[in-house]
Image: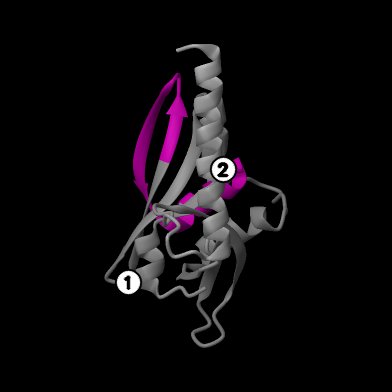
Amino acid sequence: MSPLSRISLLAVCVLLLQGAVGARERGDPAAPKVTGPQEVDVVAVMLDPRTQQPVVIMEGRRDKRSLTMAIGLAEANGIAVPLQGVKPPRPLTHDLIMTLFDRLHVSLKRVVITDLRDDIYYALVTLGATGSEMTLDARPSDAIALAIRAKVPVLVEDRVFDKAGGGA
């Protein structure tokens, strides 16, 4: 393919992408729907005023849906400490895990909250080492605590928002 043909093809692709993005921004029903897991911001850890149980609150970056997940007290502490930028005098369990990752040259790549079944949330953590990746089952609260420390994305599958009833 000639350089001019490549440039022309690239220009057509850019125009098509701009049209799709513009249609989504205008709320055009013909715009392609973005699916798959979306990145969330971990907004807060707090006590649910009704149940007095700790919860972690997340908000989707793509559609602003919220997800409130009940967690244990120790798990709430494991998320709240790094979320607030506090450095404890001694390492917490998740800090120890991050130190092990560092010493073993393993990196946390991403965390995905994958499902909600029978009021139980499920998550996967993806680890990388020496050019390969490994995905492991994890409790979402542990996965979130690690992701905050590693500064990697927390993703939530759309079906989890749907099952939990997280509105925009």
Give the amino acid at mark 1: Asp
Check if residue 69 falls in the magenta segment. Answer: no
Residue labelled with disc 1: 119
Total count of labels: 2
Viewer can see residue 61: no
Q: Nearer the viewer, residue 117 or 157?
A: 157
Q: Which residues are magenta?
A: 126-152
Residue 161 in which image quadrant:
bottom left
Residue 84 in the image: above or below residue 120: above
Give the amino acid at mark 2: Val
Residue labelled with disc 2: 152
Label 2: which secondary element: loop
Indicate the position of residue 111 as horizontal and vertical percent values. 46, 47
Q: Residue furthest bottom?
A: 50
Residue 106 in the image: above or below residue 86: above
Q: Quadrant of the N terminus?
A: top left
Q: Residue at x 36, y 38 (%)?
A: 135
